[in-house]
Amino acid sequence: MKEHLKKLHDIDWASWTAKDRATLVFVVKDAQILLIRKKRGLGAGKINAPGGRIEPGESPVECAVREAQEELHITPVAPVYRGENLFQFVDGYSIHVHVFWSGDFEGEPTETDEAIPVWVPVDAIPYEEMWEDDYLWVPLVLSGTRFLGRYLFDDDVMLDHKLEVLS
């Protein structure tokens, strides 16, 4: 257990490795963003972008497409890399999330066992129903700005963060 973690500087980021690697893909079309309400797993009940854990041998972009297909029955067109988020939880769990943006998709967003599709205007994103860090970096995704974020969480409460703009 790592309950002693209170701030980002308590973590040796030079040797940090995530337990899991994952992706998120933000699909934006006609000034609307396609989000999901997660039905299970990490962040169940919250609104997020489609995404999930990277499988062995799979690239982050391949994972982003596969997860959107599994969660919503859509295929994002030409996903573009936007940034990475490194999450450390005080209970010891950690996850490295690769973030993508897509301006189009194929298919019809459909509810699955994992997710309910939620279309919202890009200027009315429901941050109050999302992870606490999202309001910091989702606007960067939408503006085309590359970033690297580091976050420390205790369950779903953000204890500390650092967000670097890379472009």
Image (cartoon, rainbow, N blue to C red):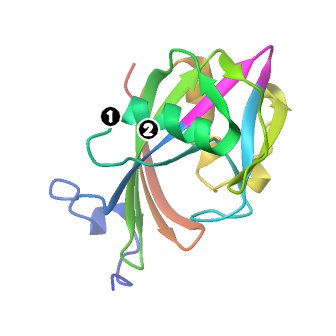
Percent across and percent down for residue 8 are 35, 61
The answer to whether 138 appears left or right of 39 in the picture is: left
Q: Which residues are magenta?
A: 25-32
Q: Secondary structure at mark 1?
A: loop
Q: Quadrant of residue 90?
A: bottom left
Quadrant in the picture for the N terminus: bottom left
Q: Quadrant of residue 141?
A: top right
Q: Nearer the viewer, residue 135 or 52?
A: 52
Find disc 2 in the rendering and name its residue. Answer: 63
The answer to whether 162 appears left or right of 44 in the picture is: left
The answer to whether 93 appears left or right of 127 in the picture is: left
Q: Nearer the viewer, residue 4 or 80?
A: 80
Is 84 within the magenta? Answer: no
Residue shown at 83% from the left, 33% from the top: 119
Q: Quadrant of residue 117?
A: top right
Answer whether labels 1 and 2 touch (C-beta < 8 Å).
Answer: yes
Q: Amino acid at mark 1?
A: Ser
Find disc 1 in the rendering and name its residue. Answer: 59
Quadrant in the picture for the C terminus: top left
Whether 93 is drawn above or below 118: the answer is below
Residue shown at 60% from the left, 36% from the top: 69
